[in-house]
Amino acid sequence: MSLAARGIERAGPVAPPITEVLAAFAQPAALVDGQGALLWLNGAFRSLFGDDRVPRSLSQWETWSPPGSGPLWGELARALSAERRLATRSGLVRFRFRLVPRKGGDAVLVATATVRHRGLDEFRQRTEILEAIFRSLNEGVMAIDAEERIIAMSLSAERITGFAEDEVLGRVCREVFHSPPEGECPFQALVRKGQSLVQREMMLRGKGGRPLHVMVNATMLQGPDDTVEGAVVVLRDLTEIDRLRAEIRGDAAHGIVGNHPTIRRLIEKIETVAPSEASILILGESGTGKELIAKAVHDQSARKDGPFVKVNCAALTDSLLESELFGHVRGAFTGAVKDRPGRFEAADGGTLFLDEIGETSPALQVRLLRVLQEGEFERVGESTPRRVDVRIVSATNKDLRQEVAAGRFRDDLFFRLCVVPIEVPPLRSRTEDIPLLVDHFLKRLALREGRRKVVSPAVFPLLARYPWPGNVRELENAIAHAFVCSTGDIVLPDALPDHILRNEGLFGDDDPHAEERRAIYATLEATGWNKGEAARQLGLSRTTLWRRMRDLGIRNPRQIGRA
């Protein structure tokens, strides 16, 4: 699907590489990393030093110069501007530095020799040069003078606010951003108070009164006597982030993504049983989202305003798990230096989620049974009963009925926990949900990484044929891997993890059905997905083939790609 079809606007013409822009500067300019190391210098910057004496970082340059008022990089990172007297091959020169952060972690550094004060008139004369830098940024940049008038606006600022620079130059910012007559616009307050802003979220009004959700960084422009002469404001548009958050919420009912009939029935069951006080046992393989189901049950219950407390029973030894669940008193065991409440007390009035309940020992099962039956327990090391009001939701990837039959799990505890069982299907049984899940994960990654990408249609057949032993969690990890390994805006097949490209488990062929799955898949591919012919070649009836395809999660990848 194209970016335009997904409602994402492409940027304008691609700007030249930033190094080409900076190479044309007559004034010293460089690229620096997040620690002040000099990554690249233009000719004017290198000319400040001899060819055999070029500093590797700003801090090294400072060591060659008289002591200043503090680390240069620290002041630049905080205020985006600084002045220092530093050593060059021509002697000591006072420089004014401007720092322009870039997406990706590096920044543009421009140095100007301050033989005389360079005021706002000269700042405006340099706007064309600065604009070349600003065009490489997604953020918008504006400059405001001491009279609170807008004196410069970058192309990105025009895009974010909707105003053309010609419409706003010379106008008081309060008039532009529709602040109330009796109040200040946020940028006027900057100039009047002389305070910088760092990572401040604001709601402004753009052209036509359109609401603008932006992240603002602002730095004061000061004269030689420290008077405020204006401000430089950097705006980051958060509209796309807001839209992504809304899309993510709309993708999922109670956070559960999918449209397969088993998922629809699962959501219906959650909505039906959640308002009750019945104990729920969630059954499913690792990675299917059992904790997500437990949280959905809690959020739909009358206890939603109470705590939701999680305990992974497989992550702790038996003695530590007992203390974690029930708490302990001082001196109960070595290292118990003070009283400590357990998770049951923390969950009072809410829901306690016991993940991997099948890993608990028989002794701990007895104590859990008492809490379920009587609603009371004792901390480790004391004999005073404590009462709690807790709803138990548990989960396991084991067949607890087999565990009961083998004597490894108490039958009375099983029946107490499993008043309402909820089974979560494995991903291989609902492969038609893969495109929905992929789209959901891409939106979350776009929020985290700050850029959107789409998946090539050629990826979906590879995802459809893979058995997903790690289920939805493994799919999420695979998409994250492909996202960060893709250099462009389209995720291509070669960005997927190698084991998925080879169609084998992450740790080799540990899937007991891998050979059968490959044989059926290969036969279907060879027959053009003619099930009758494939069944004949495999020596199966058509009904048996259909059933094995369903159980093994085998679907025609061409249909998945069109989903």
Image: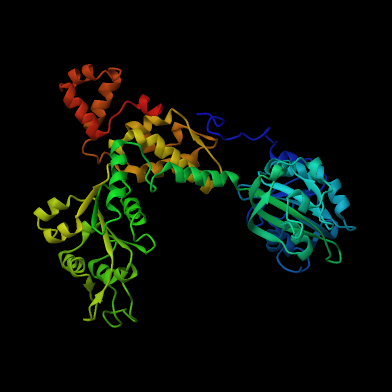
Question: The C terminus lies in which quarter of the figure?
Answer: top left
Task: Point out residue 95 in the picture as x, y percentages from the top left corner.
Answer: 81, 58
Q: Is residue 405 visible?
A: yes
Task: Point out residue 190 in the picture as x, y percentages from the top left corner.
Answer: 75, 61
Position of 91 compared to 262: left or right?
Answer: right
Position of 554 compared to 118: left or right?
Answer: left
502 is higher (above) or lower (below) than 311: above
Position of 259 compared to 207: left or right?
Answer: left
Task: Point out residue 307 in the picture as x, y percentages from the top left corner.
Answer: 37, 64
Nearest to the observer: residue 241 or residue 420: 420
Q: Is residue 99 visible?
A: no
Quarter where residue 217 is shown: bottom right
269 is higher (above) or lower (below) than 10: below
Residue beneath the point at 32% across and 25% down: 556
Quarter where residue 462 is shown: top left
Position of 185 compared to 457: left or right?
Answer: right
